[in-house]
Image: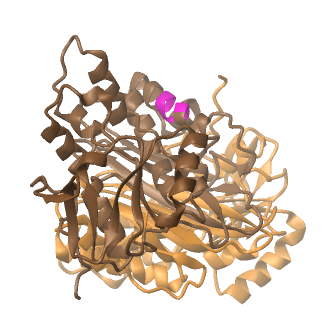
Chain colours: A brown, B orange
Amino acid sequence: MREFDLIQRFFDRPTKQRQVCLGVGDDGAVLQVPEAHELVVVTDTLVEGVHFRATDGAGDLGYKALAVNLSDLAAMGAVPVWALLNLTLPEANEQWLRQFSDGFFRLAMQHDVALVGGDTTRGPLCISVTAGGWVSVGQALTRSGAAVNDRVWITGTVGDAALALAERPVADIDSETRWLLNRLHRPTPRVGIGLALYGLASAVIDISDGLLADLGQIVRASGQAGAVIETTSLPLSPAGKSYPLEDRLTAALTGGDDYELCLTVPPSESDRMRMLSREAGVLLTDVGCITAHAGITLTQSGVPVAGPRRDGYEHVWPVARERDS
Amino acid sequence: MREFDLIQRFFDRPTKQRQVCLGVGDDGAVLQVPEAHELVVVTDTLVEGVHFRATDGAGDLGYKALAVNLSDLAAMGAVPVWALLNLTLPEANEQWLRQFSDGFFRLAMQHDVALVGGDTTRGPLCISVTAGGWVSVGQALTRSGAAVNDRVWITGTVGDAALALAERPVADIDSETRWLLNRLHRPTPRVGIGLALYGLASAVIDISDGLLADLGQIVRASGQAGAVIETTSLPLSPAGKSYPLEDRLTAALTGGDDYELCLTVPPSESDRMRMLSREAGVLLTDVGCITAHAGITLTQSGVPVAGPRRDGYEHVWPVARERDS
């Protein structure tokens, strides 16, 4: 099957996104630019054996490849508008492509994200998605604004994806496991929350590498020393209740792939955060605060406790410092 | 080596591009938006064994991965501003990364293109670059405006990359071969010409799949029937003079990877095209015209001749039609 046919058949779908002047099919895509906004662009690659298993469903992959990018846009406080897909495939398998594209567009349509272009090539399976959107001038959320005593909040529940990864595929999975697997394969990008955080959050990141690692990035980028996490405050999902508490805490602290947001908020804004949680219908939980003490300290009811040994996906804990060079 | 270190060490370099508000290191990049412009985005993937050989130099790969994208932006008439790099590598080889990034930034700096983000992952070698830029509202160049009797022009010389591909690596290559290899590995994106074509060209495409195939795309997208190419007009480079004329013509017509622009221009604008060629110091050649006859006809001094049998990289000749479905 020719590249052209692939793109036409599976990926050139109508969109309700009105900012698209020119989509799939030319040398590039053209998009309208709203006044008084800045462009935000993000990109992420999924590689077999690293980010997903060979046995994962194509529909889940298509969904997740877009979801992790929308999560990055959410962490920037941007409205998602368009995406590009670079898909490298060993073969042009129609069924795989149909499922993959269906998964992709299922999420894309929820957010009126238009797939405006891409590239389909033959080779070892590799999926890159680039997504773009807009923020009002100067209103992008970054990792670098956290101050000492700012509270650390997280959206949703954490550790679900890591618990799901620990599961072996079995024929007869229960509803809890199914729920956890869905959290792993079809994470919910917190786009609406991201858009509500300007003027409220001092720093935002999405939890892709694990809470400890990603909070560490906020601490580092903000030039702070450390943070405290109160482990009894961590929002754990009921679906994981059959696991030992220690496993659930380890998953919550070091498991990646949750794609919830971790943010810091001045303590004076706690009421507004609780109001936002109610209005948005999204769990928002205060799990700790930024401190002047080096590293991330875990507490249990206020008393320091030893943390899990496993590091987050890519970064060391205590807080990784920038290279000297 | 950690992903973070990779990005920091090789790809987080200073830029003179003043539109970057936030570059490498956060969840996304933020860019200023010029007034009364539209956003143009393009993307291309290079895969080993398909787009390059395992023996190709890393510096060339870095250069070319960006060049093919700047070529797409040129074909849209856009000013290039930023790029994202998705790099999947079997291992974090420092020497390879240094050469690759040096090649990438060599071209990036020529055009003040800022690398504002990306993703580095472990896996089979795969290189995707996404690039973006701006066009004045409504001034994007497309493939779809060609009219019957419009002249077909091309920039530079064609067939060089295909002749270079035919070469086997030898210890002692002559200067002609070196020149051809440079055309293959370090193509020149025609950014300046692209920016000068608004109001002059009716359709533009970059020649990545071969002149016949890419002109066919213009014909198809413009809803036209066909075109004529006068083979004696084709701009062949002196460096290929040791090859039989037939091989040079075949390379010029069907060889991909030249990354010159192919454009259609109303016949009344031929003088302006010649003036543009002089001013820009870039060879611009009238090689034929759009016709009402189906398919692309080759002529030799006005007399129809049989063409090369080999198709372009991805598309059929005569002109491929869109799928019925």
- Say which residue appears at 46% left-offset and 50% top-offset: A71
- Say which residue appears at 64% left-offset and 51% top-offset: A26
Quadrant containing the N terminus of chain A is top left
Asked whether residue A219 appears in the rendered view, the answer is yes
Asked whether residue B68 appears in the rendered view, the answer is no
* B22 left or right, relative to B48: right
Determine whether A245 is above or below B120 in the image.
above
Residue B82 in the image, given as x and y percentages of width and height? 54, 72
Most foreground residue, B13 or A173 = A173
Which residues lie in the magenta part?
A101-106
- Say which residue appears at 43% left-offset and 59% top-offset: A263
Most foreground residue, A44 or B192 = A44
Q: Main secondary structure of the magenta part?
A: helix
Determine whether A186 is above or below B212 in the image.
above
- Say which residue appears at 18% left-offset and 77% top-offset: B95
Number of numbered tags placed on the structure image:
0
Does B146 lie within the magenta span? no
Does A104 lie within the magenta span? yes
Determine whether A25 is above or below B94 in the image.
above
